Image (spheres, rainbow, N blue to C red):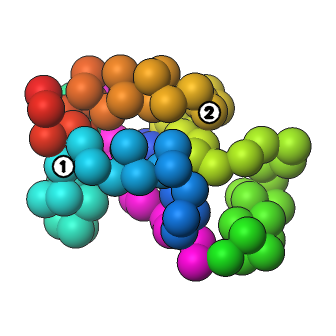
């Protein structure tokens, strides 16, 4: 059985990414042993340039999407800020709750 991992992709100087960063529960981001309610791990990837963003997305098989992007352990791809924030809140990965 494959490991359950939620992956959040952010980019430097992306205004929408900044909104998400402001709400992220940083303890969840930095703890290797963090698990969400479904037992999933939580990984955050942050690119420092637009070109790095594109390459990162290609490496993960995500095409025609702009950051921020959340790929859930169930394979769902979310790009709308409100949808990403809702997912983070639901899965205890938000500082707001």
**Residue 28 position by quadrant:** bottom left
Q: Nearer the viewer, residue 85 or 7?
A: 85
Q: CA distance from mark 2 to mark 1?
A: 19 Å
Q: Quick check: marks 2 and 1 in contact, CB under 8 Å?
A: no
Name the mark on residue 40: none
* Name of the residue lying farthest toward the right: 64
Range drawn in magenta: 38-48
Look at mark 2 in the image and give the residue it sits on: 79
Is residue 88 rendered to the left or right of residue 31? right
Residue 68: image x %, image y %? Answer: 57, 46
Query: Residue at 13% of width from left, 32% of height from top?
Result: 96
Query: Residue at 21% of width from left, 38% of height from top?
Result: 94
- In this picture, is 14 found above or below 2? below
Residue 33 seen in render: no
Residue 62: image x %, image y %? Answer: 78, 48
- Helix, strand or loop for disc 1: loop
Is residue 94 rendered to the left or right of residue 85? left
Name the mark on residue 25: 1
Is residue 58 rendered to the left or right of residue 6? right
Query: Residue at 45% of width from left, 44% of height from top?
Result: 6
Is residue 17 rendered to the left or right of residue 57? left
């Amino acid at each position: 059985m494959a490991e359950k991992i939620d992956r959040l992709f952010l980019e430097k100087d992306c205004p929408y990414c900044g909104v998400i960063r402001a709400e992220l529960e940083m303890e969840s981001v930095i703890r290797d042993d963090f698990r969400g309610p479904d037992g999933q791990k939580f990984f955050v990837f942050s690119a420092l340039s637009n070109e790095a963003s594109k390459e990162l997305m290609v490496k993960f098989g995500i095409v025609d999407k702009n950051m921020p992007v959340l790929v859930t352990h169930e394979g769902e791809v979310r790009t709308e800020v409100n949808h990403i924030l809702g997912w983070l809140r639901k899965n205890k990965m938000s500082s707001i709750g």
